[in-house]
Amino acid sequence: MNQGIDLQGSFVQALIDLGIPAGSAKALWLPLPMVLMLIAATVSIFVVVWLERKISAAAQQRIGPEYAGPLGTLQAVADGMKLVFKEDIIPAKSDPLLFTLGPVIVVIPVLLSFLIVPFGQNLVITDIGVGIFLWIALSSIAPIGLLMAGYSSNNKYSLLGGLRAAAQSISYEIPMALAVLAVVMMSNSLSTIDIVQQQSGHGVIGWNIIRQPVGFLIFWIAALAECERLPFDLPEAEEELVAGYQTEYTGMKFGLFYVGSYVNLVLSALLVAILYLGGWDFPIPIEMLANWLGVSETTPWLQIIMASLGVMMTLFKAYLLVFIAILMRWTVPRVRIDQLLDFGWKFLLPVSLVNLLLTAGLKLALPFAFGG
Amino acid sequence: MNLAEGVQLVSLLLLSAMMLGAALGVVLLSNIVYSAFLLGGVFVSISGLYILLNAGFVAAAQVLIYVGAVNVLILFGIMLVNKQRDFTPIPNAWIGKLATGVVCLGLFALLGAMVLGTPWALSTEAAAGDAAIMLIGEHFFSDFLLPFELASILLLMALVGAIILARREFLPDEDLDQPADQVLTLPERPRELVSAGSTGNTADESGDR
């Protein structure tokens, strides 16, 4: 496998050629991918909010937003501006410090998790060996923020909502981690890059969704539950809990929860795309096409096409999953809390354990297909 | 000192300060909820120190297990306990506090002397880094197999015990003999409790249905 385009190497080399010492050149490179990723996460919120509004409108035979920007694309910007200028109310007898810290702790791990999301061969902030495990660890911090928000609001609906959110997120983390473990077992690595590498090269038939259909379903269900999307949006079930842990929040603190939930949705969709849908891999192997056309893999223009196609494929797969999540929101009714916990502990957990066991057995029996 | 060393030194100092401050807060603050949240801060700082020691997997596991599981469970325990009760001031409490402080300082001095006095066999090898996962796995299934399995049996026992406590299939007899006014009630909405002696009528009614 060739290395493709090495942006970091070229950037640092260009700066060194300009007469800047190597250390400073690297230090100048460091913040760039991080800022880029923050911008990408922010833009992804706008896209998802627009999609959510438009698809919801279509599902209910409405038009949806249409005045803010062309086709209502700037509606999310308008919403965000409104939230920024809203009065920031801290309820009386609440705990102002924890009340402020809660949303922050919910959002930071989600944004940090973008560290390991690869959009292409070299388009990733860090390819660390811990990889996907880091995301599982980081996503386990969020319940603390939810509990903090629920507790500090001094409101029983908030407290119940926070406890529900934490219980839900802990329960669905285990099946999710076990589903990821089955994938990791097949690719012999926790690194997201290696996981995609192991799936690529054979087009659609190499993707993990073919080899791990059960794992894919478990992961997707658990991811929806972690994102508190319908049918699992119990923490903010409005008939029961007003708005759950968000009840007392206004202004940008509410905005942070909002941002966190949508970024989390995009992140989960990206990770499903990476773990099960082959990441940046094209459904038909491009190398094969290039060989048929007689173009060398190292041709610069082919590499640029492949890199941009990879980013587009990753985003396309992720947004396809977001689309499915939004459709599900208007298709599936909300489950009850006892059904939710029963489903998580009594169905998903045993099924994911069996899936793990089967994967291990198949890996031993058929090492060529299941990554021996 | 180059860039990497500078970043390492600054993060080491910051993480140590964070960890010590948060740990002192856990012990000294009287609000137990703050203590529990600060405990999360201690765990996160320790995981940062692991990252500085080039042990990424241990750092992630620290966050997953201690912050994501242990600390959340402690918080659950605190938040599901109903009553916000103020402690009644005990006369001469300062004697107890002083004794605790002396014992803690003594323990600190003892441990500090031990740490400084022991000739540590410091390894000069580079840290395993990303390969650490494989090494840990190999150790778990070779020379550390027994402790690993024993820990899993311990956890299983705790799991079974927790399920038995939570299911409450067997109720101790003395619960039924207690008069109704001594039964703990929720502060916001008192339950209509029927004492054990006067259940005759309701039992008959339910029998009719």
Image (spheres, rainbow, N blue to C red):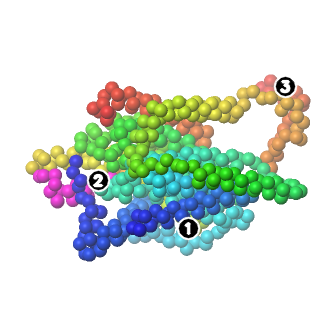
- Label 3: chain? B
Q: Is residue B142 left or right of residue B90?
A: left
Asked whether the viewer can see residue B195, the reply is: yes
The N terminus of chain B appears in which quarter of the rendering?
bottom left
Kindly give the residue lying farthest to the left in the view shown.
A294
Marks 1, 2: nearer the viewer: 2
Decide which of A156, B27 is in the foreground and name it.
Answer: B27
Q: Position of residue B161 (x, y in %)?
A: 66, 31
| Residue occupying the point 70% across, 63% down | A94
> Mark 1 and mark 2, same subunit?
yes
Asked whether the viewer can see residue A352, the reply is: no
Q: Are marks 1 and 2 in contact (CB under 8 Å)?
A: no
Label 2: which residue? Answer: A121
> Where are the magenta residues, as a range?
A295-315
Label 3: which residue? Answer: B204
Label 1: which residue? Answer: A252
Is A308 magenta? The answer is yes
